[in-house]
């Protein structure tokens, strides 16, 4: 069973992994020849990498900042940030490299990200 401590630890680990793989994706988007990307894919991959890096850093901060006092709403928000980031970025990377727009993973992931950050904001506003 996941505890508050294990979730915030997971966020720190996943945040670091997102930043590490985001760095790899940054190198790939900068150095791969154009033939590896769909039309306009390099720009899309760069945008996904930017989002991945920012969300990874945010997960690190969440994992460090919520170590003392958490509640279920904060934990749900953090889990949503992680899930939404993976879904959004993987969907955008897929489109950037294949050119196929058939996946609904990116918009769902983006929506989860937005909702998760709103949940976190409301939870912090209500904290005493």
Image (cartoon, helix red, strand yellow):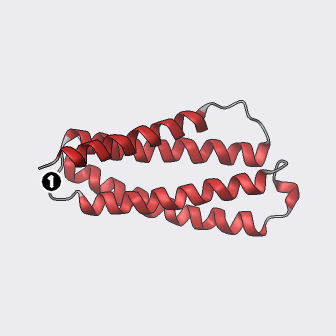
In-image side of 99 versus 15 (left or right): right
In the image, residue 5 above or below residue 71: below
Residue sitting at the far front: 125
Asked if residue 28 lies left or right of residue 6, the reply is right
30, above or below 51, in the image: below
Q: How many marks?
A: 1
Question: Residue at the location (73% across, 63% down)?
Answer: 29
Q: Position of residue 19 (x, y in %)?
A: 50, 64
Which of the pair 80/7 is nearer the observer?
A: 80
Q: Which residue is mark 1?
A: 69
Please identify the residue farthest to the left as the structure is shown.
128
Residue for point 65% across, 62% down: 25
The relative height of residue 124 versus residue 27 in the rendered view (above or below) is above
**Residue at screen point 74% across, 68% down:** 30
Say what secondary structure mark 1 lies in. loop
Check the picture and name the quadrant holding the N terminus. top left
The residue carrying pointer 1 sits among few (fewer than 14), some (14 to 19) or many (20 or more) residues within 10 Å by Cα, namely few
Residue 55, position in %: x, y?
Answer: 47, 56
Above or below: residue 71 compared with residue 22: above
Return the residue found at the far right. Answer: 35
As drawn, is 29 to the left or to the right of 56? right
Residue 119 screen position, x and y as percent: 32, 40
Instruction: Give residue 91's position: percent from left, percent from top.
Output: 63, 41
Q: In the rendered image, which quarter is residue 3 located in?
A: top left
Residue drawn where x is 81% and y is 51% of the image: 40
């Amino acid at each position: 069973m996941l505890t508050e401590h294990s979730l915030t630890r997971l966020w720190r680990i996943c945040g670091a992994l997102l930043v590490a793989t985001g760095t790899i994706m940054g190198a790939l988007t900068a150095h791969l020849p154009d033939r590896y990307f769909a039309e306009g894919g390099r720009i899309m991959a760069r945008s996904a990498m930017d989002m991945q890096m920012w969300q990874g850093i945010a997960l690190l901060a969440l994992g460090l900042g919520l170590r003392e006092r958490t509640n279920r709403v904060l934990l749900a928000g953090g889990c949503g940030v992680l899930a939404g980031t993976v879904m959004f970025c993987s969907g955008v990377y897929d489109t950037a490299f294949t050119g196929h727009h058939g996946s609904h993973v990116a918009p769902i992931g983006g929506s989860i990200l937005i909702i998760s950050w709103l949940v976190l904001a409301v939870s912090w506003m209500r904290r005493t």
